[in-house]
């Protein structure tokens, strides 16, 4: 690829969250050059989704969305953006795949309902037959050079896969096995994560990912580590109702188990982020989302793949995994009585 | 012999929609609108902490999450017997109002405009339906420039919501009893500064372009009338008070039914399922008695969208309905021409400006440092109704709480009203009524249909509760 920016520096820039300098100042020209030199086209298909991921990428600021759409990404199909309707639109998917075998990037937004042979989500017609989202992901996905699962639904199942999972929704990784898949979870994902990951693929190939398939340049840290309210936690000042100053743990904050960088990347052109606005983190980038009660203190924490423990138990399993630091903090606070033990279900009341 | 046109998918709208129309002698004689996706979010709500509704239901729609968050929290406030202090009420209004601005700009420029404006000759603007782009070249160019400018302005409106809500889409600040952050002077300034940019764009670019489109496509004042019954639940409360219908709101509650203005009574809402794939056919259910037993073998049914009716009548919801009900002078001044494809675009643009200017006043009413939330307790059992207006129309959430858990949850969303199938009496829904009688110039480029449908700003992720697994459509696009 024609680029003077080393991969190492690119990752540093992305991970730094200093988007105002990095992605606009450096990235866009390189990506434009890459596209001009024949970088892979992008097909973006939506299934069991709310379109929030698409709306989120419209908020891309650096590079701004106008550049993303017109210069940076050769976007061939996007249901909510494109001019065409009907077969005219659907044909573009298959034509692009056919003309670029193994040479295009498929972006999947939304979970894939597999119940009733996938007929809970039809995205158009093909040769006169209903085209299920399931078949589109299977067929087009298996010909792609890489698949980006954008959003928690396509990455892990997300909201529509929540019990009782009425349509048996699956993540992309359960459907396509022969193509590298990168998960960019988040409800919605930050536009920088989407654009940055696509840029990495176009310029350098596949980025480094964690055990859940998330690019480490965006998902390495946890919310709790860089939380704007961290000082409250360390000083054991806990908000008891919304609008109070204090750590939001008792109001349901899942920051200690949520992997992403929005506490310093910030949302919507840097104006704010969930916890800063007084809203408890809901851990929307995690595979378990939205499994927990949203406004209650974390009932249990994953401490290693397949192993979970309640906050109260965690004091006893120190040393188990990477969350030791947090576990220590939480256990410390529990032990010193700063955040009483979790209430039994029967005694549960509102958080007045 | 009647021709059948099926457009699947209708793109540039939220969710998955197909439309099937029958054309005889160049005129639509029958129309069916069909949603293509089901996620079953109401089933997911059952047995959860009732408060989770505020976050989960936002995920019904990424374009109007704020409206769902608002309706959910109003239904919880109602069930818990609480209401926010003035600061909380105002911040909720600013969050919802800013999303109106975002949603209306997104809808007109990025979803609907390409029906009238010829985009640049690059993907994703090509391919497109050819044949009826009438704007003069200079105006078309200005509109394309505005498309790009609008991308930035709508992002700015999202920043306004995020200032209070943490992030957009899917803000975090609307909670039972109020909002999550006490305002300070800096926030107020940050909000006003961005609002000014939005107002400049709305008044000096958005509205003039709507006028330009109206000049070039005057026949669309006559196309797509619909059912001409208007419903507004009302939204954006301007005073405290527990009675949503009676208290003063920026958008008043009201209806316009068969040519008469009337007071709105929530008890008149029922969902009919005669032509929907549900087992029950009792002729109409109250929102809290929602039927969720699918029956894909049901004869005559052709959609899993239910048919909500007000006093047995189909109702249009959205900006046109709100402004007609409040007798806004520009819209009512159009007379019956308002009930049209252009009338809907016009009302949306006028409303966008009204809400933006009103927010400038509201943000000045915030008192820095004063509380934003009323504390709450989850009752053992309760029932709540939350009515508001999403950018695309009347939105209601209903809950029943038992053992401090959600027992029943039902959302009747704007597109369920507008995209509803026929009811028990066989009366078609608003989309269908808008399509029937329309002349189709060229069945290979059926731009009339997509223009009519898109003017309603449909949001199918919201509307579709279920679809039949063995739906049988005549499977050709174009003619059969």
Image (cartoon, coloured by chain):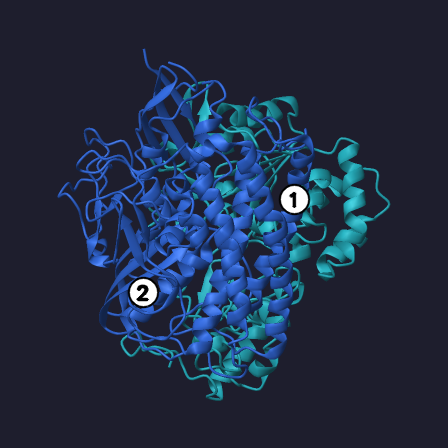
Chain colours: A cyan, B blue
Q: Quadrant of the C terminus of chain B?
A: top left
Residue lying farthest left? B282
Q: Which mark is residue A183?
A: none
What is the x, y in percent for residue B242? 30, 73
In the rendering, which numbered label is found on residue B75?
2
Quarter holding the N terminus of chain B? top left
Answer yes or no: is residue B49 visible.
Answer: no
Q: Is residue A263 above or below residue A56?
A: below
Q: CA distance from mark 2 to mark 1?
A: 39 Å
Q: Please provide percent x and percent y for residue A234.
A: 59, 83
Q: Is residue A308 above or below residue A217?
A: below
**Residue at the location (69% across, 44% down)?**
A66
Relative to residue B215, is residue B309 depicted above or below? below
Mark 1 neighbour density, 10 Å: few (under 14) some (14–19) many (20 or more): some
Q: Nearer the viewer, residue B33 or A215?
A: B33
Residue B304: name its quadrant.
top left
Q: Is residue A314 left or right of residue B416?
A: right
Left or right relative to A118: residue A52: right
Judging by the rendered image, the residue that carries numbered circle 1 is: B146
The chain letter under disc 2 is B
Locate residue A7, reporting x and y percent. Answer: 79, 49
Q: Nearer the viewer, residue B327 or A217?
A: B327
Badge 2 element: helix
Residue B187, position in %: x, y? 60, 73
Does the rendering let one see residue B65? Answer: yes
């Amino acid at each position: 690829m024609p680029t003077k920016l080393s991969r190492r520096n690119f990752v540093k820039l992305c991970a730094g969250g200093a988007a105002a300098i990095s992605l606009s100042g450096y990235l866009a020209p390189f990506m434009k050059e890459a596209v001009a030199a024949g970088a892979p086209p992008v097909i973006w298909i939506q299934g069991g989704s709310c379109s929030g991921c698409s709306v989120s990428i419209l908020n891309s600021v650096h590079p701004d969305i106008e550049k993303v759409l017109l210069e940076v990404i050769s976007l061939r199909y996007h249901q909510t953006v494109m001019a065409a309707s009907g077969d005219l639109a659907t044909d573009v998917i298959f034509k692009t795949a056919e003309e670029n075998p193994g040479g295009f990037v498929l972006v999947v937004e939304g979970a894939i309902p597999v119940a009733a042979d996938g007929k809970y989500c039809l995205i158009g017609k093909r040769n006169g037959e209903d085209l299920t989202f399931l078949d589109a992901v299977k067929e087009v996905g298996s010909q792609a050079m890489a698949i980006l699962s954008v959003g928690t639904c396509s990455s892990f199942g997300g909201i529509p896969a929540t019990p009782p999972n009425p349509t048996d929704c699956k993540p992309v990784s359960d459907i396509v096995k022969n193509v590298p898949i990168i998960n960019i979870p988040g409800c919605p994902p930050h536009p920088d994560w989407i654009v940055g990951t696509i840029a990495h693929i176009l310029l350098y190939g596949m980025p480094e990912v964690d055990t859940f398939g998330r690019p480490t340049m965006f998902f390495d840290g946890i919310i709790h580590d860089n939380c704007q309210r961290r000082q409250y936690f360390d000083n054991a000042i806990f908000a008891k109702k919304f609008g109070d100053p204090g750590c939001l743990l008792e109001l349901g904050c899942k920051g200690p188990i949520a992997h992403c960088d929005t506490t310093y990347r910030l949302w919507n052109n840097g104006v704010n982020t969930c916890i800063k606005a007084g809203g408890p983190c809901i851990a929307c980038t995690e595979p378990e989302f939205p499994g927990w009660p949203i406004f209650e203190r974390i009932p249990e924490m994953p401490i290693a793949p397949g192993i979970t423990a309640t906050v109260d138990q965690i004091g006893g399993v120190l040393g188990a995994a990477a969350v030791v630091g947090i576990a220590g903090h939480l256990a410390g606070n529990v032990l010193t009585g700063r955040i009483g033990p979790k209430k039994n279900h029967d005694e549960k009341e509102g958080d007045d | 012999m009647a021709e059948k046109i099926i457009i699947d998918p209708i793109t540039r709208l939220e969710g998955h929609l197909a439309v099937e129309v029958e054309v005889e002698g160049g005129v639509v004689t029958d129309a069916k609108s069909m949603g293509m996706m089901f996620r079953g979010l109401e089933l997911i709500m059952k047995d959860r902490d009732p408060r989770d509704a505020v976050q989960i239901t936002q995920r019904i729609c990424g374009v109007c999450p704020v409206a769902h968050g608002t309706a959910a929290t109003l239904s919880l406030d109602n069930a818990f017997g609480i209401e926010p202090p003035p600061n909380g009420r105002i911040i909720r209004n600013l969050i919802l109002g800013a999303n109106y601005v975002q949603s209306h700009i997104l809808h007109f420029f990025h979803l609907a405009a390409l029906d009238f404006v010829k985009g640049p000759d690059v993907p994703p603007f090509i391919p497109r339906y050819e044949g009826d782009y009438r704007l003069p070249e200079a105006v078309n160019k200005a509109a394309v420039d505005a498309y790009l400018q609008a991308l930035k302005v709508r992002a700015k409106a999202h920043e306004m919501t995020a200032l209070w809500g943490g992030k957009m889409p899917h803000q975090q600040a609307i909670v039972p009893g109020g909002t999550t952050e006490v305002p300070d002077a800096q926030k107020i300034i940050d909000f006003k500064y961005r609002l000014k940019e939005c107002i400049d764009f709305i008044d000096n670019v958005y509205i003039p372009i709507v006028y330009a489109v109206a000049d070039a496509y005057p026949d669309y004042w006559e196309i797509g009338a619909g059912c001409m019954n208007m419903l507004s639940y009302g939204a954006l409360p301007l005073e405290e008070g527990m009675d949503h219908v009676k208290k003063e709101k920026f958008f008043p509650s009201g209806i316009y039914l068969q040519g008469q203005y009337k007071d709105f009574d929530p008890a008149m809402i029922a969902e009919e399922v005669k032509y929907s794939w549900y087992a029950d056919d009792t002729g109409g259910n109250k929102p809290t008695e929602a039927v969720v037993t699918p029956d894909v073998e049901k004869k005559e049914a052709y959609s899993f969208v239910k048919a909500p009716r007000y006093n047995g009548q189909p109702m249009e919801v959205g900006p046109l309905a709100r402004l007609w009900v409040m007798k806004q002078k520009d819209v009512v001044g159009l007379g019956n021409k308002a009930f049209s494809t252009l009338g809907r675009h016009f009302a949306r643009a006028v409303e966008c400006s009204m809400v933006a200017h009103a927010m400038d006043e509201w943000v000045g009413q915030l008192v820095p440092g004063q509380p934003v939330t009323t504390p709450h307790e989850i009752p053992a059992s309760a029932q709540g109704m939350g009515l508001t207006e999403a950018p695309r129309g009347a939105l209601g959430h209903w809950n029943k709480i038992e053992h401090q858990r959600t027992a029943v949850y039902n959302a009747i969303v704007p597109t369920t009203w507008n995209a509803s199938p026929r009811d028990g009496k066989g009366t078609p829904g608003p989309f269908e009524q808008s399509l029937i009688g329309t002349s189709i110039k060229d069945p290979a480029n059926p731009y009339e249909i997509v223009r009519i449908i898109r003017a309603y700003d449909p949001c199918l992720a919201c509307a579709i509760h279920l679809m039949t697994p063995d739906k049988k459509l005549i499977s050709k696009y174009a003619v059969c």
